[in-house]
Amino acid sequence: MKTPKMRTIGLTGSIGMGKTETAKMFAARGIPVFDSDAAAHTLLGPSGAAVEMVEKTFPGVKIDQQIDRKLLGQRVFNDSEALSRLENILHPMIQTLRDDFSRNTECDLVLFDIPLLFEKGYEADLDYSIVVSAPYEIQKERVLERPAMTEDRFKEILKKQMLDEEKRGRADFIIETGEGLQYAEKQVDDILKKLRKN
């Protein structure tokens, strides 16, 4: 839900593409940003709204009034049915938080950081979509720098995500992050200029 003058932007990108840093660039320019991952962490965190339902669905993942996300991840990572059950709990709750965010925001533009923007069809509810992208070798290098990440796990994650090429083909705008922060920031500024001209 949005106000009549508000235009909504969906930001997405595969793992290691620089989506989080790009969202920060929009925020630094005064664009309200709703972080779907952060919302999920809140829902699963201490006394979060999803804690009891997730524990009921996946007994043993609740520790100290919150969901142990590592334990939960082990339960759903290679089990598509289990992952679907988790998404059916979290996604409607995140949508409610997203709607509340829009209602309480007074700005001409608002950005929603949504990892599964295209996979789940959320772009249909938004005015524009932006994909953050980088060459594969840069993506791989970034991801393998993460703690406990292995090349096999990286490949498994990629299998579960829409191909970068397909995301690029569906996006209204593309932000290339392979050439550094300064170049990415220029692209953010250019996109905002175009949107505000419209």
Image (cartoon, rainbow, N blue to C red):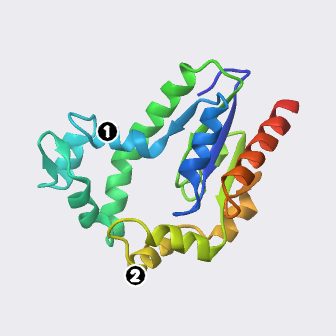
* Quadrant (top left, top right, bottom left, bottom right) of the N terminus: top right
- For disc 2, the neighbor class at 10 Å (few under 14, some 14 to 19, many from 20) is few
Residue drawn at x 28%, y 62% as measured from the top left: 73
Per the image, label 1 sits on a secondary structure element best described as: helix
Residue at far right of view: 197
Amino acid carrying mark 2 in the image: Asp
- In the rendered image, residue 35, in percent from the top left (x then y), is placed at 49, 40
Q: Is residue 81 left or right of residue 105?
A: left
Residue drawn at x 19%, y 41% as measured from the top left: 52
- In the rendered image, residue 185, in percent from the top left (x then y), is placed at 71, 46
Q: Which residue is mark 2?
A: 152
Front one among 56 and 181: 181
Q: Is residue 172 left or right of residue 52?
A: right
169 lies above or below 198: below
**Residue 43's mark?**
1
Place residue 71 in its image quadrant. bottom left
Residue drawn at x 58%, y 56% as measured from the top left: 18
Front one among 85 and 198: 198
Amino acid carrying mark 1 in the image: Leu
Q: Is residue 60 visible?
A: yes
* Quadrant (top left, top right, bottom left, bottom right) of the C terminus: top right
Give the mark, 2 or 1, whose residue is nearer the N terminus: 1
Label 2 – label 1 distance at C-alpha: 29 Å
62 lies above or below 159: above
Front one among 1 and 172: 172
Residues at discs 2 and 1 in contact (Cβ within 8 Å): no
- In the rendered image, residue 119, in percent from the top left (x then y), is placed at 56, 59
Q: Is residue 160 visible?
A: no
